[in-house]
Image (cartoon, rainbow, N blue to C red):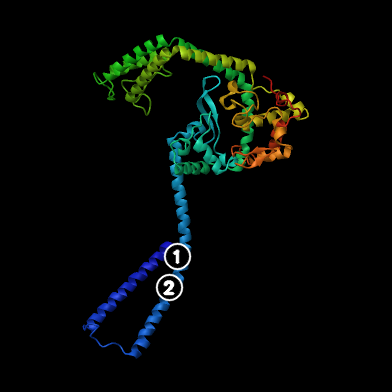
């Protein structure tokens, strides 16, 4: 509509200009005498025809403006809304670029559904590859925008989540963070989908408890392998350095000789590198051995043999360097690895992930083990990452149930002390905390406690409250702790 108005105005202006030019030309042709020397019009002419024409022109102009301004106004609304949409779409594109450039999806999942990150677990000094990173596709059901901006800006200390905002010491300015928030917000699931997540998360929490012993056993085996790698790093670094040197020699001379497939690697080079890569794989220095076919420039579809060769040789050289550094720091790394092994073995004995569901049922649910089991799994799925130390790092690193981490400990009847009634506690869990506002008896909100009222049903919230407010004041008993 705005385009139509602009067109009408432009045509009117052109017509008026043409009229003025035409009038002047006619006047010049009819009366070549300069205006200041010509006889002026009489008062009758000025006050009749001349004045009437001026008044008619004024009325026509006023009428045109009367019609044009509302039409322009209506078009302007659409134009402004169009700009809002255009700016928002541009912000989403920039936010997506930030998401990709800084690898947000590497931890939180490419579809924002959650994932894992690597982290050095402080208590054990064990490198954890499976630190649980939360889903972000329901973030705004749990936090408001300012709270989400806080976490992105300042990160979460003692976790793999670093600060990303300039104020927190990160690389992103405020506009980039807003773009990233817009991108995340555009990928939020519907509330019904958020509610439907519950059963999957509860099942996952249950499976974690059931399979924890096997997971920890696997980590113990990996730690034993690491200790052996450190112990033999001197011999291994020398052997791998020799393999890497031979591979580099062949690659550097790849242009010499017959090159059947024209990929820049001579047939002798491809055959020799294939044998060296197989040797390295057999010795455990390469996870996979690249096979180079002298008759095919792309033995692996889409990847040229020259690229595969350069990548594998680089991996061998990097591995040799890493083993050399390990050997140079063998004593320190060996002590650290043995300490970690002892930690894992102790964790396997303590089995802090286990929960005596029957004890919980007897203490808090009138003997209803099904309700007690669901309550424990709900707590682990939604509360444990903040209120159970080490939970996100995995079963081996989990400390006592509800021992506290980012959030306070909930042991020893803390829920009963902070909240005089179950209704007060329910409202707090459902709505979360607000920075500076009080909650419970003497709590002051920080804005860090998310609200779960949009992602959990009233029945499930009641189960969590009932579990945490157990029937006795002994923390270990009312939470069903075993280890």
**Residue 291 in view (yes/no):** no
From the viewer's side, name the closer residue of 450 and 276: 450
Q: Quadrant of residue 465?
A: top right
Which badge, 2 or 1, is on the more N-terminal residue? 2
| Disc 2, SS | helix
Residue at the far right in the pictured view: 366
From the viewer's side, name the closer residue of 356 and 109: 356
Q: Is residue 373 left or right of residue 436?
A: right
Residue at the far left in the pictured view: 32
Percent coordinates x, y for residue 270 in the rendering: 31, 18
From this view, report whether residue 480 is shown above or below residue 225. Answer: below
From this view, report whether residue 109 is shown above or below residue 336. Answer: below
Query: What is the crowding at mark 2: few (fewer than 14 residues within 10 Å), some, or many (at least 20)?
Result: few
Q: Which residue is mark 1?
A: 72
Q: Which mark is residue 52?
A: none
Q: Which mark is residue 64?
A: 2
From this view, report whether residue 266 is shown above or below residue 440. Answer: above
Query: Which residue lies at the image location 26% right of the left edge and 88% below the top edge?
Result: 39
């Amino acid at each position: 509509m705005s385009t139509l108005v602009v067109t009408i105005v432009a045509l009117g202006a052109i017509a008026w200009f043409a009229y003025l030019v035409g009038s002047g030309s006619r006047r010049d042709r009819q009366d070549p005498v300069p205006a200041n020397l010509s006889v002026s019009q009489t008062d009758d002419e000025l006050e009749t025809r001349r004045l009437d024409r001026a008044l008619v022109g004024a009325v026509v102009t006023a009428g045109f403006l009367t019609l044009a301004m509302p039409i322009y106004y209506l078009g302007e609304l659409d134009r402004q809304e169009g700009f809002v949409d255009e700016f928002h779409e541009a912000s989403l594109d920039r936010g997506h670029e930030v998401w990709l450039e800084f690898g947000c999806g590497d931890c939180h999942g490419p579809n924002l559904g959650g994932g894992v990150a690597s982290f050095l677990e402080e208590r054990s000094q064990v490198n954890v590859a499976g630190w649980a990173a939360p889903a972000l596709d329901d973030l705004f059901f749990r936090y408001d925008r300012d709270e989400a901006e806080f976490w992105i800006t300042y990160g979460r200390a003692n976790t793999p989540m670093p600060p990303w905002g300039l104020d927190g010491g990160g690389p992103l300015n405020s506009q980039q963070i807003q773009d990233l928030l817009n991108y995340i917000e555009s990928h939020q699931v519907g509330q019904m989908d958020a509610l439907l997540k519950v059963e999957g998360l509860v099942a996952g929490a249950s499976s974690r408890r059931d399979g924890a012993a096997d997971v920890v056993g696997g980590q113990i085996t990996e730690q034993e392998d690491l200790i052996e790698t450190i112990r033999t790093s001197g011999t291994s670094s020398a052997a791998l350095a020799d393999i890497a040197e031979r591979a580099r020699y062949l690659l550097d001379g790849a242009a010499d000789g017959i090159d059947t497939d024209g990929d820049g690697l001579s047939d002798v080079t491809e055959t020799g590198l294939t044998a060296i890569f197989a040797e390295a794989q057999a010795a455990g220095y390469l996870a996979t051995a690249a096979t180079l076919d002298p008759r095919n420039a792309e033995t692996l579809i889409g990847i040229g043999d020259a690229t595969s060769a350069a990548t594998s040789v680089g991996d061998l050289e990097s591995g040799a360097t890493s083993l050399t550094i390990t050997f140079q720091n063998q004593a320190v790394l060996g002590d650290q690895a043995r300490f970690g092994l002892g930690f894992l073995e102790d964790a396997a004995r303590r089995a802090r992930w286990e929960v005596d569901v029957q004890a919980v049922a007897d203490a808090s649910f009138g003997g209803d083990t099904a309700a007690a089991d669901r309550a424990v799994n709900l707590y682990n799925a939604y509360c444990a990452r903040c209120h159970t130390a080490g939970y996100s790092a995995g079963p081996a690193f989990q400390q006592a149930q509800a021992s506290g981490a980012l959030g306070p400990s909930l042991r020893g009847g803390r829920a009963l002390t902070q909240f005089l009634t179950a209704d007060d506690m329910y409202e707090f869990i459902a709505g979360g905390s607000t920075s500076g506002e009080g909650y419970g008896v003497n709590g002051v909100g920080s804005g860090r406690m998310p609200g779960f009222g949009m992602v959990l049903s009233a029945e499930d919230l009641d189960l969590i409250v009932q579990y945490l407010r157990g029937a006795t004041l002994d923390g270990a008993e009312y939470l069903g702790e075993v280890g």
